[in-house]
Amino acid sequence: MYRWLCAALLSLATLPALADSYLTRLLNKPVPGGVAVLDLGGSTAAPQAYFAGKAVLVIKEQATWRAVVGLPLSLKPGPQALQVRQAGGERSVAFSVGSKRYPEQRITLQNKRQVNPNPQDLTRIAAELAEQTRAYQSFSGTIPSNLLLDKPVNGRLSSRFGVRRFFNGEERNPHAGLDFAVPAGTPIKTPAAGKVILVGDYFFNGNTVFVDHGQGFISMFCHMSAIDVRLGQALTRGAVVGRVGATGRATGPHMHWNVSLNDARVDPAIFIGAFQP
């Protein structure tokens, strides 16, 4: 009886340490479009982790390795599994994805081609999508400088992540980022150190910059009036990447920011302490 009681007390004593993980408190929002933070144990060498066949960010927090997993908006709620490889073989780490309801947004555009592009537009869009998809799928070995991100601009959130969007009454892809209502020309700053991996002027996104923060953790900024960086440039945290504008499919000046983990677009609000369940 005494041994059982001691074992039970020891088990309870470990719970606060597990629950007190800084990364878990900050980032663990396991819903479609959210993030799951999973305990991978305390091995000496870093394990490799994969979700849906794609490499996942793994970082050491004190003595414990943790996987920071991006969950796509298309993911169905329910049981999921992370595949982990390390010395000694492979294993699965089970976790559960909850549900989240996202609101709707209805937008009227004067340029009808931005709702129903013509055949030439569609050819251009397909090529641009392939280029941007390759950027989102980038995975470098760099450890991100920080996972608690800075806001790229200071301003009011005008459109949240995941909103179901209807352009001129026709449903299109959900909103994949955050929009900030700020004046044209406002400097946009990178929320963490990184490397510029793509720069372009796209049909829907307008002037666009992708910044790789490391291990598939990527920021994308678009609709900019000006781009202030070049392809391959290394950026320190807070460096200016461009200026707010209304290029591409936009009804007015604003700052649009995407965050991607393991090629899944996730809610940037999670990383700035503004997530709404």
Image (cartoon, grey):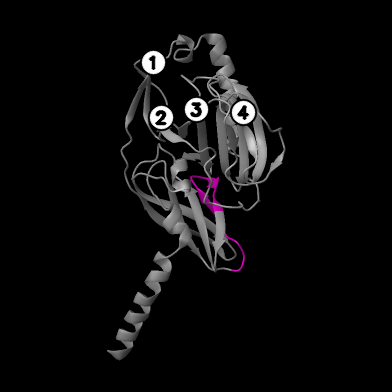
Q: Earlier in the sequence, mark 2 or mark 3?
A: 2
Task: Please tell me whether mark 4 or mark 3 is closer to you in this view.
Answer: 3
Q: CA distance from mark 4 to mark 1?
A: 28 Å
Say whether residue 28 is magenta: no
Q: Position of residue 204 (x, y in %)?
A: 53, 21
* Residue linked to disc 4: 131
Depth check: give the residue in front, 96 or 244: 244
Residue depicted at x 33% and y 81%? 9
- First in sequence: mark 3 or mark 1? 1
Query: Label 1 is placed on what type of residue?
Result: Thr
Asked if the residues shown at circle 2 and circle 4 are in contact, with their CB atoms under 8 angstroms apart, the answer is no
Q: Is residue 80 above or below residue 268?
A: below
Q: Nearer the viewer, mark 2 or mark 3?
A: 3
Q: Quadrant of the N terminus?
A: bottom left
Which dot marks residue 108? 1
Residue type at numbered disc 4: Glu
Question: Magenta segment: does it hold 52?
Answer: yes
Task: State the residue position of label 2.
Answer: 174
Q: Residues within 10 Å of mark 1 (few under 14, many from 20)?
A: few
* Residue denoted by label 3: 254
Q: Nearer the viewer, residue 14 or 240?
A: 240
Mark 2 or mark 4, which has the lower sequence index?
4
